[in-house]
Image (cartoon, rainbow, N blue to C red):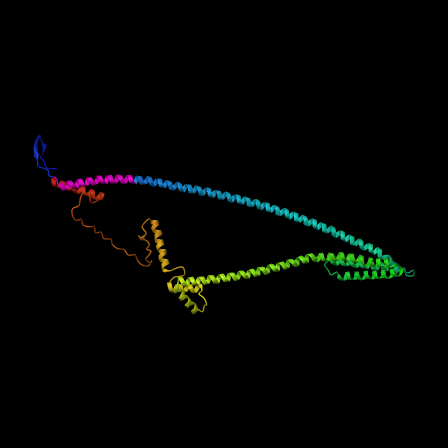
Amino acid sequence: MTATSVEKQVNGTSVASPELRFDPRALAEAEAIRTRAAADAEAARIEAEGKAEAEKIKAAEDARKQKILNDKAEARAIEEQAARDARIAKHNKDRREAELAQAAAEEESRQAKNDEAKAAEEIAVADDKWRSYALNFYRVCAVVAMPVQIAAFYNPRAIWLMAAPLMLEGGAWVVLKGAAAAVANRRPSWHYRLIAWLLAFIAAGINLWHGLNAFDPATALGTAFASIAGPGVWDLHEHGRIRKRDGALTSRERKAAENAAKAEAKRLAAEEKQRAADEEAAKKAAEEAAAKLAADREAMFPKVWQHAVKLAADLGKTSVTDAIWAQAKLDVEGAKPGESADVIRMRNAAQARVEAARQNRPVNTLSKATNAQRASQVPPVKKQRVYSPPARRGIRSKGDVKYTSAARRQASIAAKQTAEKKDR
């Protein structure tokens, strides 16, 4: 802008004012400031629009992520509900099966008890019948054997001798009843039975002698047999009671027990053989594993292995045990098994990466609170930051420097003040 004459109206008269001069540099700076202000406003507008668009995109992304989370939560809830329904169904099924199994077991137990009761009843009926049949047979045999014995003892001058057959047959019967009482009281009964057999043979001898002399051989043999058969059948009945009381086994039961014992012995022998084979296999596998471990240690840690072998020989051990290996590892590498300088550095680096990811900063930026490469007892080193901006050299083109808003305001104020000073 060039200088011109300016007229002012002062008290109704026109007077000439001195020429106003403007600094081109100040005008250029003001124009630059206005240009930068417009550019900053445009940049702010673009930045605001970008932020708004970014907020929209972020909101849309957050909504999408939230929808995914909601869908996952809904799917997880559906899966949990399905799993819960499946567990309930399985529980109900197991309970029904358990109830059915319990009912079947109770029914089987009732049936077994009924069968046992029925069998016991049948046995009791059979025992009663057997006892009654044996007793009636004894009576019949006594009736058959008594007449020949009475005839043998008949004497018109000694009629009382006819009571001797009653003494023999009755004595055998009384002694057998004593044997039955002994069986019932769980006392020895063999001597009772021996006396009953002795009396029976005496009666049979009398019948045989007198029958052959006074009658025919058939009568003699029949009456002698009757004298033995009656007490013999009854004694057989008592013998069965004794075996039942003592729980004696039949020949079939004894054979089955022997077969079961042989099978059990065979099974135990097979189990012992299998156990020995398993122990041998386990021992061999343990030896192979120990050999492989020793080879791996020797290949991966040669220095530690050499020291461990020396340490085992020094301690009088024939092999490198875990305790010797731990001591050798501590002696050579200064760390226990599973630890080393490389492992510790790797762990520290991994922890630094995790912390950097949590704080959303570069991995190489160390935290002010912790230092992965500094021990806890070493104090942190702080360096004073020195700011030394580069010096401007040469003439720069318009708009080559970006100013902050505060700098731009300060430049505008300085330009105004300079113009006011020149006007004065």
Q: Is residue 222 left or right of residue 47?
A: right
Quarter of the figure that contains the C terminus: top left
Whole-percent x, y for residue 82 in the image: 48, 42
* Most frequent secondary structure within the magenta stretch: helix
Q: Nearer the viewer, residue 386 or 181?
A: 386
Q: Is residue 391 above or below residue 150?
A: above
Q: Is residue 181 above or below residue 9?
A: below
Look at 62% across and 58% down and name the residue there: 263
* Res 178 visible: yes
| Magenta residue span | 22-50
* Res 184 visible: no
Q: Nearer the viewer, residue 212 or 186?
A: 212
Q: Is residue 252 left or right of residue 103?
A: right
Whole-percent x, y for residue 163 in the image: 86, 59
Q: Quadrant of residue 40?
A: top left
Q: Is residue 338 left or right of residue 228?
A: left
Whole-percent x, y for residue 16 in the image: 7, 34
Q: Quadrant of residue 371?
A: bottom left
Q: Quadrant of residue 178?
A: bottom right
Whole-percent x, y for residue 393 in the image: 17, 49
The stretch drawn in magenta includes residue 48: yes
Look at 49% across and 44% down and name the residue there: 84
- Circle count: 0
Q: Is residue 367 above or below residue 21?
A: below
| Residue found at the very far right of the displayed protein | 157
Q: Is residue 368 left or right of residue 256?
A: left
Quarter of the figure that contains the N terminus: top left
Look at 84% across and 56% down and name the residue there: 144
The stretch drawn in magenta includes residue 378: no
